[in-house]
Image (tube, rainbow, N blue to C red):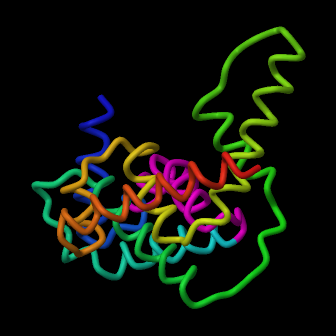
């Protein structure tokens, strides 16, 4: 029972038991790394962001409402940490392969045709370069909307702004991404 295991882990974590947090880390670390990597475009920076988010989860565990599932609450911590790091650190993104691997994992086309595989890798590489050209906030909105499957209202809650603002920013991010992809 996955839900029961999570409930027990959350209760232990809330009581200050590190084993509860360890269970949550094992369960959600991969998903959190994918979200952070897609926002930051740097796997090493994403790992640091996720570690910081887990540390904040430990420190602020008393703010967690036990009526909520853990992942949405934690995902919010990850996104805010990734955006904070993106705003405060200017760095060159030299690792495109990590993003391409994440995108391939999420959108893999299983084929034995080598030319189809090469074509898919080229498309994912183009997408990675275009995403890199977007702002971290635009990437965050696109990741939440398309990758996480969240609605505009939920994204607005996470990012602390009006749904109309997210709707506009989503439109703007899609337009910019489309222009970047067509310009290549």
Q: Quadrant of residue 56?
A: bottom left
Q: Is residue 39 magenta?
A: yes
Residue extending furthest right?
A: 114
Quadrant for the N terminus in the image = top left
Stretch of the chain drawn in magenta: 21-44
Residue 162 versus residue 148: which sits nearer the camera?
162
User: Would residue 135 be found to the left or right of residue 2 on screen?
Assistant: right
Q: Quadrant of residue 41?
A: bottom right
Dominant SS in magenta: helix
Q: Residue at x 46, y 71 (%)?
A: 137
Q: Residue at x 81, y 61 (%)?
A: 95
Q: Residue at x 57, y 79 (%)?
A: 86
Residue extending furthest left?
A: 67
Q: Is residue 62 magenta?
A: no
User: Would residue 89 be found to the left or right of residue 175 on screen?
Assistant: right
Q: Tag count in the figure?
A: 0
At which x and y percent is residue 78?
44, 67
Q: Is residue 17 above or below residue 150?
A: below
Q: Residue at x 57, y 57 (%)?
A: 33
At which x and y percent is residue 25?
48, 56
At which x and y percent is residue 125?
77, 45
Q: Is residue 53 above or below residue 68?
A: below
Residue 16 versus residue 29: which sits nearer the camera?
29
Residue extending furthest bottom?
A: 88
């Amino acid at each position: 029972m996955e839900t029961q295991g999570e409930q027990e882990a959350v209760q232990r974590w809330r009581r200050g038991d590190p084993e509860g947090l360890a269970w949550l880390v094992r369960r959600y670390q991969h998903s959190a790394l994918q979200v952070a990597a897609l926002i930051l475009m740097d796997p090493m920076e994403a790992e640091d962001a996720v570690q910081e988010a887990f540390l904040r989860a430990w420190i602020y565990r008393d703010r967690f409402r036990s009526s909520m599932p853990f992942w949405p609450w934690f995902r919010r911590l990850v996104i805010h940490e990734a955006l904070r790091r993106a705003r405060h650190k200017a760095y060159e993104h030299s690792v495109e392969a990590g993003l391409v691997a994440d995108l391939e994992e999420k959108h893999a086309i299983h084929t034995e045709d080598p030319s189809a595989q090469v074509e898919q890798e080229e498309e994912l590489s183009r997408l990675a370069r275009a995403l890199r050209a977007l702002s971290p906030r635009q990437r965050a909105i696109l990741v939440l909307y398309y990758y996480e499957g969240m609605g505009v209202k939920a994204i607005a809650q996470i990012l602390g702004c009006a749904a109309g603002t997210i709707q506009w920013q989503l439109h703007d991010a899609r337009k910019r991404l489309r222009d970047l992809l067509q310009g290549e």
